[in-house]
Image (cartoon, rainbow, N blue to C red):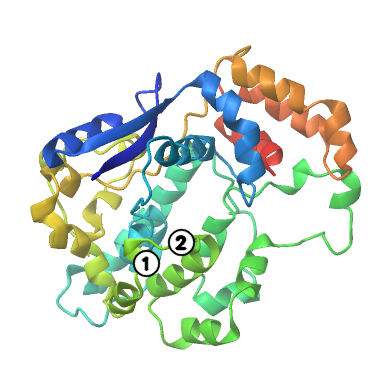
Amino acid sequence: MAGTIRSGFSGSPEWDLGCVAERTEDWLGVKVIKRDVDKASLARDFADTAYHCEHHHFDLNCVARFALSTLPREHGVKVVLTGDGADEHFAGSSYFTSDFLREPDLSQPDSPTSNSELRKSMYSAVDAEIKALFRNIGAIQHEHLPDSEALTDDNSSVMPASLVLWHPTTQLFAPWVRELKDYDGQDCRDTVMASLAPEARAKMRSLWHPMHSTHYIWNKGSLANARTPFLDYHLTEYVNKLPPSVKLAYSPVPNEEQGEQGPLWKNAGSALHLLKEKWILREAVRAYITTELCKRRKNPFLAPTRWPRGGAKHRLFQGLLTREAVEALGFLDYAVVEEALERAYNPKGDTRAFRKWYMLERG
C-alpha cells in the first residue's frame, strides 16, 4: 500500500499543517492514515512518550510523534519511509542561514552573495532576525555569555548555541548546584564543541565552509540512527560535495509570489526571505510535488505552547510537579519550577516558562 501517515494538532489551526498535507495527498492521489492530537490525548500519552524518548525535550511535538508511531502497526503497515535528513543535508532549517553568510562560497564566484558588501549586510540582518524568531517561540538565548576559546574552532558558528537553545538555565537548579566550583561559569556550548572529533575541529578551522561546519555539528548532535532515503550512503556522499550556495540559495521573490509561508515566517525579517533553503532539492523534485510545496518555506513541527488553565494538561503537570516530587530529585529549585508552571498557564501564556518546566518534566 502506498500512502501517507501523519498526525496534527486539532483545535490549533496555527500549528496544524494538515491543510497543506491534505492538498498534497489529493494531488498525489494516495491513501491517507492520520491521527488528530488534542488536549486529552496529549495528556494521556505524555507519560509513555517520556518513557520512550531518549533525551529531554522542549515541546509537546514529541507526544504527537509518539501517537504517530502507533499508526503503522494498527493498520498493518510494515515499511515507512520518512523525510528525515533532508533539512540536515540541504540546509533546510533557519539555523544554517547565518553561517552560510559568514564567509563567501568560493566555489560559486558568480553568486550574488559573493559580493562582499551584500553578504555582510545580509549576515547582520539575518543574525538579528533569527534571534528574534527564536525569542518569539520561547528559546533560551545565550547572548550574555562571552565567546569561549573552544568556539573559535568553528569560526564562532551559531550552531553550538542553537543546539542548547532549549537547555535549562542555571536558575532552574538548586542553590547548592549553582554554587559548585566546577559548575560556576560552565558554558554548555563548550560541551558541544568538546564532543567533536579533533580532526573535524581542525577542518572547521582551516578547510570547511562555516555552513558545512554547522551541518557537521548539527548532524553529530541530532540525527537518529535510522534507515531513511535521505540518509542513503550514496546520496550522503554526493550531497557532502555540493557547494553551500546550491543548498541555501540567494533567491529574492516578490511578496505577492511567495504564497502562505506558515506561522514561523509571519514576523520574519526581510533578509531571511531573500534566501531559499533546500534549493537544489526543490529543483530536483519540482515535477513531482505541488507548486505550493515548492514555494513554501520550512516550518518546524512545533506544538502549541499556550493551553487553558485548569485543562487536562495543566491538571496533569500540577500532579507531577509537586514540591515533594521536585525536591526528591535533589538538584532542582522548587520555587523556580512552581513559578514557571504558574506563568506557563496564566491567561496570556508565557512560552519561555512553558518550555522551562516542560524540559524539566521530560528530563
- Left/right placement of residue 337 relative to residue 50 reads right
Task: Look at the numbered discs 2 and 1 and tell me whether their residues touch, using CB distance below 8 Å.
Answer: yes
Give SS at disc 2.
loop
Locate residue 84, reporting x and y percent. 38, 56
Classify the position of the N terminus by image quarter: top left
2 vs 1, front mark: 2
Residue type, mark 1 in image: Leu
Marks 2 and 1, Cα distance to the nearest angstrom?
8 Å
In the picture of the structure, the residue carrying the numbered disc 1 is 231
Extreme residue toward the front, this view? 76
Give the camera-side residue of 49 and 319: 49
Locate residue 245, reporting x and y percent. 24, 70
Q: Residue at x 33, y 79 (%)?
A: 237
Residue type, mark 2 in image: Ala
Name the quadrant containing residue 112. bottom left
Classify the position of the C terminus by image quarter: top right
Name the quadrant containing residue 174. top right
Give SS at disc 1.
helix
- Left/right placement of residue 86 relative to residue 310 reads left
Locate residue 32, reporting x and y percent. 26, 34
How many residues crowd mark 2 within 10 Å: few (<14), some (14–19), many (20+)? few
Q: Residue at x 40, y 67 (%)?
A: 99
Locate residue 7, reporting x and y percent. 39, 34
Asked if one can make out residue 17 in the rendered structure from this viewpoint, the answer is no
Number of numbered tags placed on the structure image? 2
Q: Residue at x 22, y 32 (%)?
A: 22
Extreme residue toward the left, this view? 287
In the picture of the structure, the residue carrying the numbered disc 2 is 226
